[in-house]
Image: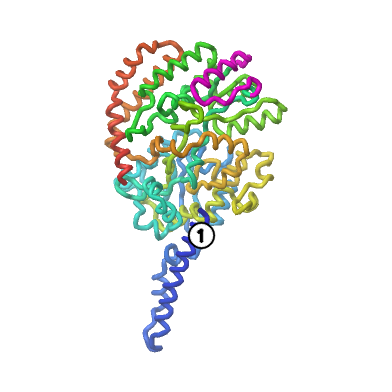
């Protein structure tokens, strides 16, 4: 990746040199008496942010306002620290040579409400960054709130443009259905970095009971009962309510549940909670619940409650993220506990089969920076945003300054002093990098090497590239009319499905009524919702 971007930069430099040489040669061959352009005309012809760009830092007194429509997970600063005063943001200003006016919504604020208030007003920022932009982009451009970047991206944001156009699947993901490039998306150098959650099991108990990590539904049934018989209080627990219980096992019944909607083998959009295999899945999970294998607090556990149970040795298996379980392991080691954990795959039909459905993400998960029509210097705004996709910019966004990392085998790796700082890794990442949350840059694959060996092993177990085809692309767009037509239906469907699935598991509703449940989903408009989403998916494929 680095070599490719360096090659592109060198090629661009060579092109500029060649044309400059031709111009010089033409001038020297002219008669001495020929009229020469005056200095004012020469300066006026220069495009110092385009063809004549001299690199960063840019020499300007101008300010670009950047509104972050998220209080916690984008360009995240430590709690109580204003972005304007944070070390990483201050360092970014120095590297850019451009003053950034950071605008943020208050902690705990509703991002959608903040977005609506911003768009309703006349005083727009130069750039705004937040979630859900693919679905809003075309309308924002049509309404004259944001600009399409097609005519300027290659000139003023060449690093971003060269990267997204180097791969058809990425190029497709950062345009709207009209073919417009609408902003700067958070992207990943490898989609492997988008898989960060899955199932974990008590390795020490598996060893003690002479069992293997479960892969099939039959394996899970055997392991959970064995844990119960061995005295484990909660053989299976979660902090993620229904999805935390169901997601690991749904693939064993032929469908995915990492999101409500997925792409089936038939190329159609499916609603997970209306799949035929759901009935058998719920029957199995209800049986486990009735046998006391599932934590009765699975619908109310929060992160702290689940962690307490895990550190107390009361949980045998759960679904979590790699970062979270790595934290569990560190704390258990500090306690000199003999408890150990191991990752396992989503349920498969036969042991050793490849996973068919996983937690994963596609290119462009919907977090995008858009330039507004209020911006008075669009080329400068584009250069500011492009920095995150340059070689130096990617490193600064992912790792911060040179004080934080060493270069090992050609890749930046955080120093032990960074990882072991008493402030903790989360605070360090928020203080000195932009990657405690998601920023407008390329998440570098080398960051994977910075994970603990245990966390790397978890992701390697959970990830399966061939399963990504089932994930609904995050950059599918619906028109305003389409979105409005399904909004109330989708909300009602989600609420009803959640209520009924919980009742089926808890025994408050008989599975004999499952067909009536499916019929009611259709009465609520499921067929129409799927039809609209399918149309959006097909437009995405045709971009």
Does residue 430 appear left or right of residue 522 in this picture? Answer: right
Query: In the image, what residue occupies the spot 37% across and 86% down?
Result: 34
Query: In the image, what residue occupies the spot 54% across and 54% down?
Result: 93
Is residue 371 visible to us here? no
Residue under pointer 1: 6
Q: Position of residue 363 (x, y in %)?
A: 43, 43
Q: Position of residue 188 (x, y in %)?
A: 48, 45
Q: Position of residue 201 (x, y in %)?
A: 58, 25
Report if residue 225 lies within the magenta region: yes
Relative to 231, residue 20 above or below: below
In this view of the protein, which residue sits in the foreground, 443 or 70? Answer: 443
Q: What's the magenta region?
A: 207-233
Relative to 522, residue 383 above or below: below
Relative to 486, residue 294 above or below: above
In this view of the protein, which residue sits in the foreground, 269 or 121? Answer: 269
In this view of the protein, which residue sits in the foreground, 56 or 39? Answer: 56
Image quadrant of residue 200? top right
Q: Secondary structure at mark 1?
A: helix
User: How many residues crowd around disc 1 within 10 Å: few (fewer than 14), some, or many (20 or more)?
Assistant: some
């Amino acid at each position: 990746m680095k070599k490719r971007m360096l090659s592109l930069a060198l090629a661009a430099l060579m092109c500029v040199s060649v044309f400059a040489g031709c111009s010089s040669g033409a001038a020297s061959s002219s008669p001495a008496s020929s009229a020469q352009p005056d200095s004012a005309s020469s300066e006026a012809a220069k495009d110092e942010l385009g063809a004549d760009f001299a690199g960063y830092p840019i020499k300007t007194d101008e300010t670009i306002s950047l509104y972050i429509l998220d209080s916690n997970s984008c360009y995240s600063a430590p709690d109580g620290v204003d972005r304007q005063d944070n070390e990483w943001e201050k360092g970014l200003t120095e590297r850019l040579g451009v003053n950034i006016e950071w605008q943020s919504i208050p902690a705990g604020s509703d991002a959608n409400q903040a977005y609506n208030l911003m768009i309703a007003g006349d005083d727009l920022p130069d750039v705004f960054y937040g979630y859900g932009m693919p679905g809003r982009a075309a309308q924002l451009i049509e309404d004259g709130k944001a600009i399409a970047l097609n005519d300027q991206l290659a000139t003023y944001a060449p690093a971003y443009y060269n990267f997204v156009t180097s791969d058809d699947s990425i190029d497709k993901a950062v345009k709207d259905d009209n073919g417009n490039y609408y902003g700067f998306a958070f992207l990943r150098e490898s989609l492997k970095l988008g898989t960060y959650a899955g199932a974990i099991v008590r390795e020490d108990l598996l060893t003690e009971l002479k069992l293997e990590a479960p892969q099939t539904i039959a394996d899970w049934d055997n392991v959970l009962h064995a844990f119960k018989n061995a005295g484990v209080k909660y053989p299976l627990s979660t902090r993620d309510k229904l999805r935390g219980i169901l997601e690991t096992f749904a693939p064993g019944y032929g469908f995915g549940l990492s999101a409500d909607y997925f792409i089936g083998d038939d190329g159609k959009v499916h609603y997970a909670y209306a799949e035929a295999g759901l009935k058998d899945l719920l029957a199995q999970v209800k049986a486990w619940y009735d046998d006391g294998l599932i934590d009765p607090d699975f619908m109310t556990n929060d992160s702290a409650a689940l962690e307490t149970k895990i550190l107390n040795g009361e949980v045998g298996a759960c679904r979590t993220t790699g970062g979270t379980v790595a934290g569990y392991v560190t704390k258990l080691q500090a306690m000199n506990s003999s408890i150990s954990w191991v990752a396992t795959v989503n349920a498969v039909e036969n042991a050793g089969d490849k996973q068919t459905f996983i937690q994963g993400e596609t290119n462009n998960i919907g977090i995008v920076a858009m330039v507004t029509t209020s911006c008075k210097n669009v080329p400068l705004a584009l250069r500011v945003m492009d920095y995150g996709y340059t070689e130096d910019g990617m490193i600064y966004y992912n790792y911060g300054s040179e004080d934080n990392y060493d270069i090992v085998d050609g890749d930046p790796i955080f120093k032990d002093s960074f990882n072991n700082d008493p402030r903790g890794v989360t605070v360090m990442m928020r203080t000195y990098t932009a990657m405690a949350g998601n920023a407008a840059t390329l998440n570098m694959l080398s960051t994977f090497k910075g994970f603990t060996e245990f966390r790397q092993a978890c992701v390697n177990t959970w990830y399966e590239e061939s399963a990504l085809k089932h994930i609904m692309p995050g950059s599918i767009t619906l028109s305003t009319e389409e979105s409005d037509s399904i909004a109330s239906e989708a909300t009602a469907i989600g609420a009803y499905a959640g209520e009924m699935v919980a009742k089926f598991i808890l025994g408050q509703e008989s599975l004999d009524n499952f067909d009536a449940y499916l019929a009611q989903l259709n009465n609520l408009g499921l067929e129409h919702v799927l039809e609209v989403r399918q149309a959006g998916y097909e437009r995405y494929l045709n971009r």
